[in-house]
């Protein structure tokens, strides 16, 4: 008896360590950073918690912005100058590009303020403050409530709080976010600026050097940066674009360190990680590993092959699909690394072991039976999750059908009369046709719907779908007929649409395709996924608390403190150090790369590796100016142990003194499972060395006038 207990305890102690945060794992809330600051300082950080986050005086947080709704940026001058990644500014650079002015290919540099290019729909948000508002949000909660009632209560209390918080207007924006699966709620108050202008971007042959071949990989040589400037009204307040606006004066901006970086140096990343699932049940991970990721990867491979073939044949199509291709390919490649990583770490098995230990500890507590309950919910959810994944990676990717649906939505009945918003229709048509190439869309339809036929179980095939397949025999014939007869393939016809044409639009095959699937999905799938996900939310809320209690029972208070909330696009701090890694037996990767590596990859015959002639000349003459490092080469990228994810792109990489040393933009392929499980031996973030940014601005862009407004650490 005694022996069994000890054995269990030993197992529990050993396993608890596998889920609680280890060295360098974690994305911490800046307002609570005082709880981590001793650890940070022990690892080399020389500033204080107040320097990172302070709502009464300027702190580093005031130099960091949410760029758009999915990247991070940082201020590098007192005049609103901002750095982010090339891939974060990509759609803006593309928007301003045409065959005549191909800024994607050639780069762009404003040589004065009035050459900076305004951008529709781009905003940056500064975090004013964040605050624990759990008691406000759960005010009125009673444990007898159903999950549905709780969701409604949280929604109501959140809206009231947000309204109250933002009533002063002035660009104020607020969100309430659940942390630890709703065990806690935080209010985030932002100031959003909408006049953000493009200042510069290197040519893609630098900014996207290595393209999708090198994406998610180390060693890396990508100059992944672009520059913008934030404008404000004369009182420094947010204002819509106006030529009278003036450069925004930040409370704080980063000093730049050009002293260089070395293995072992302390690094800290300040940014907006999007989403992680570190506390997931083994069954959730198993679904991702065995079904979700593999099928999504296969579908995207088909679409990417089609895009790549057509893009290789025409410069126009290459520009049109550049941004779409990058988006499709990015997750496609990440998922591949993720599956490998999960397998290599045996995450499902490790989690199962942990769950066994948890379950035996949980006996007699409020957590008894929770592990089994979650497993049962996942089992029920699986077919619906698969149907959802398949639907979103097939039907929802057909551009023509999406467009047809958005046009159909412009028919509305007003005072009993059918109306059609022609202005909005013209705008939508403009942006759709600018970047649409029918052969790609049509071939993709045939390819993905062929897979639908093969891989989706009969009970998840809508009646409409079956009738079409009956009629056409195969997806190819269906595609040819749909694209051959839809009015939406014809820009001229679309421009002539009026309220009278409603019946024709609603009978159009592209619209019918989208609409029938949507109706089926809303009726047969979504109610189930919503219900099951609600139940899972509820169970996870308990499981999250349970994991923390379990850790405390095993490791004491330190066990509990090791839990950081999953990422949810709120501001976080991740700290670590510069470090190489071993991706495979017998291989060791050093932590930094230089211009020499660019030259080793340079190949005029391969699109991704064809560098500008100017860079070749600079290399031949070693014309590096002040940007060479001790080895005599220009540093390009480095890797570190910071825990990051999508959304951290563009984040400042900061040294022990709080100065900017780099720009985060990626992770290493072998470590992309870090959204689910972090391996300190393998998981590395990839950053651009700030010296390569400066080198490129000066030597390639000829825009070193920008250095005048920056501040360099001595
Ligand atoms: N992998 C990086 C991140 O997830 C960069 C993506 C952009 N580059 C690309 N080749 N698609 O966003
Ligand atoms: N490249 C990602 C981003 O755009 C960063 C990552 O996933 O590591 O945010």
Image (spheres, grey):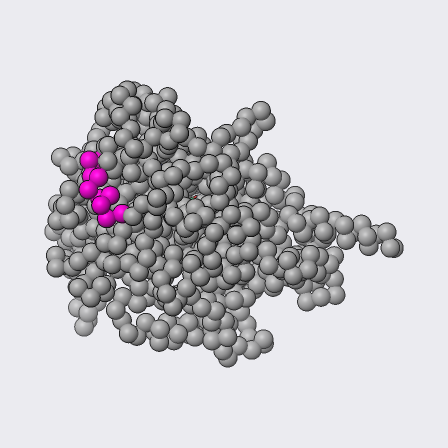
Residue 580 among magenta residues: no
Name which quarter of the figure residue 80 lies in. bottom left
| Residue 84 shows in this picture | no
- Residue at position x 74%, y 57% in the image: 360
Residue 406 in percent (x, y) is at 26, 54
Image-quarter location of ligand 2: top left
Query: Magenta stretch mostly in which secondary structure?
Result: helix
Q: Quadrant of the C terminus?
A: top left
253 lies above or below 307: below
Which one is nearer the viewer's eye here, 158 or 193?
193
Nearer the observer, 341 or 267:
267
The residue that appears at 40% across and 37% down in the rendered structure is 260
Residue 133 makes an appearance in the image:
yes
Segment colored magenta: 701-710
The N terminus - image quarter: bottom right
Q: Residue furthest front?
A: 714
């Amino acid at each position: 008896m005694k022996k069994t207990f000890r054995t269990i305890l030993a197992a529990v102690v050993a396993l608890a360590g596998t889920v609680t945060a280890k060295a360098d794992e974690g994305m911490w809330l800046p307002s609570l950073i005082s709880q981590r600051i001793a650890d940070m300082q022990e690892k080399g950080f020389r500033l204080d918690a107040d320097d990172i986050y302070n709502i009464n005086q300027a702190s580093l947080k005031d130099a960091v912005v949410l760029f758009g709704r999915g990247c991070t940026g940082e201020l590098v001058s007192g005049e609103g100058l901002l750095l982010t990644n090339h891939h974060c500014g990509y759609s803006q650079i593309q928007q301003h590009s045409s065959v005549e002015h191909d800024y994607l290919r050639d780069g762009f540099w404003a040589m004065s303020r009035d050459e900076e290019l305004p951008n529709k729909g781009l905003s940056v948000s500064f975090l004013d403050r964040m605050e624990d508002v759990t008691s406000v949000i759960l005010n009125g909660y009673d444990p007898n409530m159903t999950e549905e009632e709780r969701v409604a209560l949280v929604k109501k209390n959140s809206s009231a709080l947000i309204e109250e918080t933002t009533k002063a207007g002035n660009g104020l924006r607020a969100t309430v976010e659940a942390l630890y699966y709703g065990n806690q709620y935080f209010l985030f108050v932002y100031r959003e600026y909408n006049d953000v202008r493009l200042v510069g971007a290197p040519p893609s042959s630098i900014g996207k050097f290595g393209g999708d071949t090198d994406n998610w990989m180390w060693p890396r040589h990508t100059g992944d940066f672009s520059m913008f400037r934030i404008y404000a009204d004369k009182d420094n307040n947010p204002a819509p674009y106006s030529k009278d606006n003036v450069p925004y004066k930040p409370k704080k901006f980063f000093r730049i360190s050009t002293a260089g970086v070395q293995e072992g140096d302390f690094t800290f990343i300040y940014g907006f990680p999007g989403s992680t699932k570190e506390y997931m049940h083994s069954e959730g991970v198993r679904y991702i590993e065995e079904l979700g990721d593999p099928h999504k990867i296969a579908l995207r491979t088909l679409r990417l092959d089609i895009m790549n073939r057509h893009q290789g044949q025409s410069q126009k199509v290459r520009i049109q699909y550049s941004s779409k291709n990058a988006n499709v390919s990015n997750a496609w490649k990440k998922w591949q690394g993720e599956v490998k990583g999960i397998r290599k770490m045996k995450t499902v098995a490790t989690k199962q072991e942990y769950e066994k230990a948890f379950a035996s500890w949980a006996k007699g507590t409020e957590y008894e039976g929770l592990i089994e309950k979650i497993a049962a919910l996942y089992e029920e959810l699986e077919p619906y999750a698969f149907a959802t994944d398949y639907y979103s990676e097939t039907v929802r990717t057909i551009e023509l059908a999406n467009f047809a649906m958005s046009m159909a939505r412009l028919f509305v009945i007003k005072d009993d009369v059918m109306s059609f918003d022609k202005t909005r229709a013209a705008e939508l048509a403009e942006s759709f046709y600018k970047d649409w190439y029918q052969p790609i869309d049509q071939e993709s339809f045939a390819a993905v719907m062929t897979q639908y036929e093969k891989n989706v179980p009969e009970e998840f095939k809508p009646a409409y779908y079956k009738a079409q397949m009956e009629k056409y025999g195969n997806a190819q014939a269906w595609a040819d007929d749909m694209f051959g007869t839809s009015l939406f393939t014809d820009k001229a016809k679309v421009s002539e649409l009026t309220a009278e044409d409603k019946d024709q639009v609603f009978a159009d095959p592209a619209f019918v395709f989208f609409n029938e699937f949507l109706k089926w999905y809303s009726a047969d799938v979504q109610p189930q996924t919503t219900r099951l996900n609600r139940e899972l939310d509820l169970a996870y809320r308990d499981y999250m608390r349970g994991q923390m209690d379990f850790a405390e029972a095993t490791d004491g208070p330190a066990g509990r403190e090791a839990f950081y909330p999953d990422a949810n696009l709120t501001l976080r701090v991740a700290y670590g150090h510069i470090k190489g890694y071993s991706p495979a037996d017998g291989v060791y990767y050093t932590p930094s790369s230089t211009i020499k590596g660019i030259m080793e990859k340079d190949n005029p015959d391969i699109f991704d590796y064809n560098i500008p002639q100017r860079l070749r000349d600079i290399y031949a003459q070693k014309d590096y100016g002040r940007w060479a490092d001790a080895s005599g080469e220009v540093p390009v990228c480095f890797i570190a142990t910071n825990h990051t994810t999508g959304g951290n792109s563009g984040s400042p990489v900061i040294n022990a003194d709080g100065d900017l040393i780099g720009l985060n933009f990626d992770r290493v392929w072998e470590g992309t499972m870090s959204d689910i499980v972090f391996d300190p031996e393998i998981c590395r973030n990839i950053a651009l060395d700030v010296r390569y940014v400066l080198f490129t601005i000066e030597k390639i862009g000829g825009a070193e006038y920008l250095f005048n407004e920056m501040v360099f650490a001595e």
